[in-house]
Image (cartoon, grey):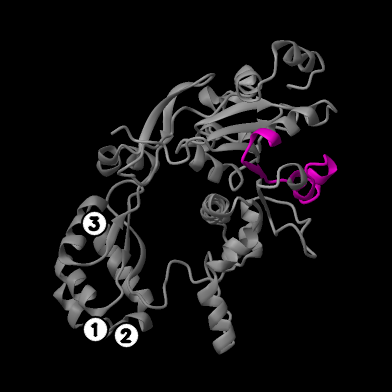
Amino acid sequence: MEKKWIFEGLKIADFCTAAVGPLPLKYLADHGAVVVKVESSQRPDVVRTSGPFKDGIYELDMSAWHPNYNTSKFGLALNMNRPQALDIAWKLIEWCDVLGESFTPGTMKRWGLEYESVVRVKPDIIYYSTCQQGQDGPHAQFRGYGPHASAVAGVYHLTGWPDREPATIYGAYNDFIAPRFATAALVAALDYRRRTGRGQHIDLSQYECGATFMAPVIMDYFANGRIQSRRENRAPDAAPHGAYPCAGPDEWVAVAVTDDPQWKAFCRAADRPDWAEDDRYRTLLARKEHEEELNREVASWTRLYPADRIMSELQAAGAPAGVVRNYEGLFNDPQMAHRGHFVRLEHAVIGEHHYDGSPYKLSKSPQGPRWAGPAMGQHLEKVCLDLLGMTEDELAEYVAAEVFE
């Protein structure tokens, strides 16, 4: 029996930008939904201005980031500053099942496209809004990107060294949390509509998504009045715990020993039985008390061997360890190759290159990505003529009005 796409027939108008807005809609597109990505060369999706850029050419359609975050979508350039653009926006709303937007609260209302106006025309619409701190409240107008939401959520208070200022994590921590919440909310809303025939407004606060992962430190404050802060790579319930240098150039291995049996396994793999018998390291409490000395000794051993060898020997012995992969190592990882994670797709401007595939496999349905994310306005005729049912004369009038730019 031929596999059927999970979201086949689902129609989505995507007015989102950056990561948190577009990614959940990409996941639906990669599983069969028809998604129209709406942006403008006058106000492009911000990831088009972020590298890496093919051949180092800084142009909107040369960014490899944008097509990776918008696979399986059709692209429509629509300049919302043109009055006639609203006609197209409303055609998209009448066509779609789901509308997504990630503007600062009030932006869609200025165009007359806020949820209250849309739901009067389309009662069963699922209207997905995401912004920094939600659609209402004293800080609703707070603007920014993932690092800003991560900062106000308290994430960066915990990252770094105790004697230094807070350190950001590579990438925007919140941007890799919030899309998963949004996807779950969208699927739940779709199920609700399937059962009841009614849509709803999803109001996703990226700030609150990040704060959810601060639960242990918030509970520690409520229960004990203690404010946790930066402690480099250390953990309260593990030692040794951290990334340790290895023999190769810029090679590292991450180790996380959480109990005494694991520590004994570590000592066997390192051929250092004296560590296991040393009173400074015999128990977890002792190791935490002498953690500075312990880390120096562990690093003196890891420096002698390649990271892959250390990882393999520690894992075989029963001590948790993993190589810190650089991006070349990640791309060439045999497990990733076996799973077929990276997929080669043809982009209209960049040409063929690799994209992230789905990290999970579904046994009874196919999954994408189906094609590379669109170049700016790439699918004008496909969207207007085939999806929205406009005539060629109507399309020509809008083209003459410079709506599609």
Determine the residue positioned at 60% across, 37% down: 12
Count of labels in the image:
3
Q: Which disc, if any, is residue 232? A: none
Regarding mark 2 in the picture, which secondary structure is present there? helix
Q: Residue furthest front?
A: 196
Q: Are the residues flagged by discs 2 and 3 in contact, CB closer than 8 Å?
A: no
Kind of residue sitting beneath label 2? Ala
| Other-residue count near label 2 (Cα within 10 Å), few / some / many at <14 / 14–19 / ≥20 | some
Q: x and y percent of residue 366 in the render?
A: 36, 36
Kind of residue sitting beneath label 3? Met
> From which residue to which does the magenta span run?
93-118
Task: Give 204 or 256, whichever is nearer the viewer.
Answer: 204
Q: x and y percent of residue 130 in the render?
A: 66, 51
Regarding mark 1 in the picture, which secondary structure is present there? loop
Residue 81: quarter of image: top right
Determine the residue positioned at 71% across, 43% down: 122
Question: In which quadrant will I find the N terminus?
Answer: top left
Q: Are the residues flagged by discs 2 and 1 in contact, CB closer than 8 Å?
A: yes
Residue denoted by label 2 = 286
Task: Give 44 or 190, whichever is nearer the viewer.
Answer: 190
Q: Which disc, if any, is residue 311? A: 3
Q: Which disc, if any, is residue 282? A: 1
Tell which tag, 1 or 3, sits nearer the viewer: 3
